[in-house]
Image: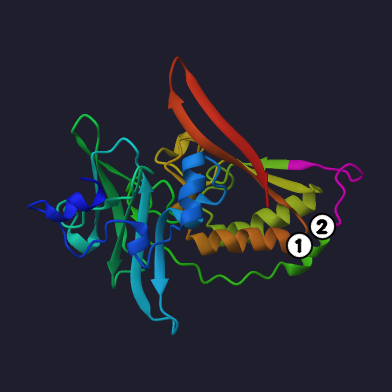
Amino acid sequence: MGIFSRFIKKNSTPHIQPATFLNPHSTLGELDLYLITEGRHEQLWKALGAHVRRDDSNELLGTAFSVWAPNAQAVSLIGDHNFWDKNTHKMVRIGSSGIWEIFIPDIGVGTRYKFAVCGIDGRWVDHADPMSRATEIPPLTASIVEESNYVWSDSEWLNTRREFEPWRSPVSVYEVHLGSWKLGLSYRELAIELVDYVRAQGFTHVEFLPVTEHPYGPSWGYQVTSFFAPTSRFGSPDDFKFLVDALHAAGIPPCFIWTTHAKKANGCQISMVAVRI
């Protein structure tokens, strides 16, 4: 019966649109769906996750949520807005893409949420949003709707970066784990103390062990739960941007070990890449 079959079920939710092209507040366009299906979408954080939607006068409309769960039988959005009840806001699957989405009016920044997923085995499991950009402070595990207001001040550094020739310049990298370098410092405090230390020691670059959100501190960040959320242990996403901005202002390019997965299968298998920004 296809995607419209949801509307004739006894427990259907009439106000939820059945597909992206009928949802004016969706973050997913035809090209997004095509690239995700092909496995070639290179900016997933713009398409999936939680995105605050505003009108032309910047008034809040609500928040659009989407997640890729191709083997799920059902997905619901749970959070502060519905008392964590999986029966209130059932998400809609977009055709055969494996993507589920929903738009909730009048909720915005600061809302805690998760995705309740009914797996192929019929069991319901609550999941944090892998594409969220903000999270609760561990050991709490909910994702948080986020909207950045940070104004970058590194245009001069970006212009200088274009002229940098690493094959002709000396490179000395200071690797650091934020959770164990001078315990207790926030991102904004690190923007002073870490930057001063690296500059005084003569390093040209900083490489951070994974800073994306992870539940277990001693893992050094290799057990990722949200790929695009800097860990909330040291401050907000905008606080993290302040740290990066301070490094740029000091002429110190930061590099990040970005872990794409960490799982146990005959030992620990970790896929990671170093990213310079």
Type of amino acid at the residue the image marks with label 1: Leu
- Secondary structure found at label 1: helix
Q: In the image, is 248 to the left or to the right of 107?
A: right
Residue at the location (89% across, 41% down)?
167
Type of amino acid at the residue the image marks with label 2: Arg
Range drawn in magenta: 163-173
Residue at the location (48% across, 22% down)?
268
List the single residue furthest toward the top.
266
Q: Is residue 28 above or below residue 275?
A: below
Q: Which mark is residue 162?
A: 2
Along the line of sight, the residue nearer the viewer: 3 or 246: 3
Question: Do we see residue 144 in this rendering?
Answer: no
Q: Main secondary structure of the magenta part?
A: loop
- Residue linked to disc 1: 158
The scheme the figure's colours follow is rainbow
Along the line of sight, the residue nearer the viewer: 15 or 255: 15
Position in image of residue 123 (x %, y %) = 19, 34
Residue at the location (78% across, 68% down)?
156
Q: Is residue 226 above or below residue 220?
A: below
- Quarter occupied by the N terminus: top left
